[in-house]
Amino acid sequence: MSDERRGYLYGLTAYTMWGFFPIYFKLLRPAPPLEILAHRVLWSVVFVALLLSAMRNWRFLSRLLRTPRLLGGITLAAILLAVNWGTYIYGVNSSRVVETALGYFITPLLVVLLGVTVLRERLRALQWVAVGIGVLAVAILTLDYGRLPYIALTLAVSFGCYGLIKKRMSLPPAEGAFVESGVLALPALAYLTWLNLSGSADFGHVSVTHTVLMMLSGVATAVPLLLFAAAANRVPLVGLGILQYVAPILQLAVGLLIYHEPMPAARLAGFGLVWLALIVFTVDGIRSARTAARNRAAAAAEPTLEALPAR
């Protein structure tokens, strides 16, 4: 198997795991979302720490401690990640799996808007068309829900901003996951201690299966992240961009087919516009990548001055 095909396998596995996350997190009820989030953070730290110990790779901590700006960026990224995780768990366990899927469908469009507003990037015409269709879709879904789809928007904004911050840092995935979870570990531990002292904790009081699943939430969090990182190093950006739609498609299927969440006509129309925007966005990305590849090939084929025959 070639390295690129292996990368696609890693990426597909990661996004498939994320796609079935609603089933996993529903199994963690009756624990409330905040308790699930706190355990997810703590067990992620434990799992990644064991992984780094096996790899004998702790040298990155010295560089981190010597760079306050990097530490500040990771802290902000960790807060955004906690908002994303907490919102997702709340959405799943309040029977809004379809709305969480919507959040990850519109994330690529929001990332484009962040590029314009924060990085001062210029959009191509088709990208503006995709963003416009996406805005119209959110307006239709707002009318259908009778409110802004705040779970979807919170997921998209938090993950988009998280990706923007991560893009400016250079920590490898395992090290980044450890530090981000480590930043959140102290407040998570304090919250869980308070829950136990007040007698409100569900961990260890529901069933053995529930306790084991809560502990494994760290593994379930870290494994797809590491698989995604392995895929990102092997798969072209366009291929990775197409793979990212696997997770919300599966989440939508889980919400509709397993949990039988409603999909009235207006909501279906809103989702249809989101999908249309993503098709436009993806086609534009593929065209742009092909044009860039042709330009690079043409530039490489042009003879240099030194290669021209002497006259």
Image: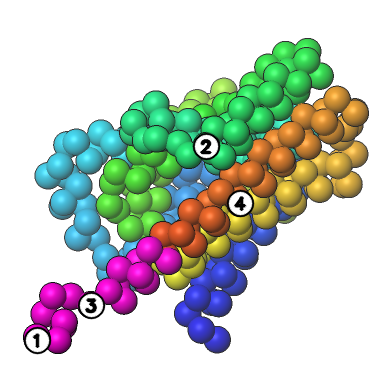
The furthest residue to the front = 311
Q: Earlier in the sequence, mark 2 or mark 1?
A: 2
Image quadrant assignment for residue 304: bottom left
Name the residue beneath numbered marker 2. 125
Task: Tell me how far mark 2 sits from mark 1, CA to CA.
Answer: 45 Å
Find numbered disc 1 in the image and state the secondary structure of the residue it sits on: loop
Who's the residue at 31% across and 76% down the image?
301
Image quadrant assignment for residue 123: top left
* Relative image position of residue 204 (x, y in whole percent): 64, 43
Tag 3: amino acid: Pro
The furthest residue to the top = 146
Task: Tell me how far mark 3 sits from mark 1, CA to CA.
Answer: 13 Å
Of the pair 218 and 238, the residue shown nearer to us: 238
Tag 2: amino acid: Ala
Per the rendering, the mark at residue 310 is: 1
Q: Earlier in the sequence, mark 3 or mark 1?
A: 3
* Relative image position of residue 224 (x, y in whole percent): 55, 58
**How many labels were placed on the picture?**
4
Name the residue beneath numbered marker 3. 303
- Please report contact status of discs 3 and 1: CB closer than 8 Å, yes or no: no
Q: Nearer the viewer, mark 3 or mark 1?
A: 1
Find numbered disc 4 in the image and state the secondary structure of the residue it sits on: helix
Q: Is 217 situated above or below 300?
A: above
Q: Nearer the viewer, mark 2 or mark 4?
A: 2
Q: Earlier in the sequence, mark 1 or mark 4?
A: 4
Q: Earlier in the sequence, mark 3 or mark 2?
A: 2
Instruction: Report the span colored magenta.
Output: 294-311
The quarter of the picture where the C terminus appears is bottom left
- For the question of whether residue 65 can be seen, the reply is yes
Tag 4: amino acid: Val
